[in-house]
Amino acid sequence: MFELYKLPKLTYEYDALEPFFDARTMEIHHTKHHATYVNNLNSAFSEYSLSGLKLEDVLKDLTLVPSQVRNVIRNNGGGHWNHSFFWKILKLNTKPTANILQLIERDFVSLENFQNQFALEAKKLFGSGWAWLIINHQNKLQIVTTANQDTPLTMGTPLIGLDVWEHAYYLQYQNCRVDYIEAFFSVINWEQVENNLLK
Ligand code: MN3
């Protein structure tokens, strides 16, 4: 089987984020949802002989690939990119680094206010998509949302991303997206956020 892209291994166990994100959701999310994006992405790259292209480049500019495969790559390539990013920014018991805190206070006044704004945008997002904290092209922190599996790559450098598709929380939180968003603030890996900032 053609395998340009691989499902990344998590660096922690599925139950590592309990009680905030439950093990069953993490396992299904990783081994079923993310794996499907990877398989579909590999099929598309194989069928259209795209293996010379870099996924990030294509996601920033879909005109690099034939029009009939753009939506497949947008959805599944985006799905692969977004989830690979998401797994890395999850960890229990980390705190914002001095760097990050300084930027958050500069652009959102306080960490609490940032969290409120982020939660509001994530809650407001209609249907499936993602909420992000990015550094935009003006070098300011900005909260943005993307629909479906669209990435924020053209808008700036992503620092934090939250999957707000129902598959990310329904087993544990059912219709209570707000509780899932609140729980997310307890599992943000601020060390990785700092890594993302330094990129
Ligand atoms: Mn997902």
Image: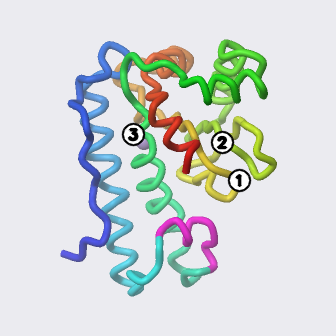
- Give the residue furthest to the left: 1
Q: Which residues are magenta?
A: 55-63
What numbered label is drawn on residue 88?
Answer: 3
Q: Answer whether labels 2 and 3 touch (C-beta < 8 Å).
A: no
The residue depicted at 40 percent of the width and 30 percent of the height is: 90
Indicate which disc, 1 or 3, sits on the residue closer to the N terminus.
3
Label 1 sits on what residue type?
Met
Q: Residues within 10 Å of mark 3 (few under 14, many from 20)?
A: some
Q: Identity of the amino acid at label 3?
A: Lys
Q: Quadrant of the N terminus?
A: bottom left
Say left or right for 8 vs 92: left
> Is residue 47 placed above or below 114 in the rendered structure?
below
In the foreground, 195 or 115: 195
Where's residue 98, x and y in %? 59, 23
Q: CA distance from mark 1 to mark 3?
A: 20 Å
Q: Position of residue 80 (x, y in %)?
A: 41, 55
Q: Which residue is mark 2?
A: 134
Residue behind mark 1: 155
Q: Quadrant of residue 12?
A: top left
Any magenta on residue 58?
yes
Of residues 41 and 190, the one drawn nearer to the viewer in this rendering: 190
Residue 197 among those drawn in magenta: no
- Whichever of labels 2 and 1 marks the residue nearer the N terminus, that label is 2
- Is 194 rendered above or below residue 79? above
- Spot the residue most to the right: 138
Q: Tell which of 53 and 145 is nearer to you.
A: 53
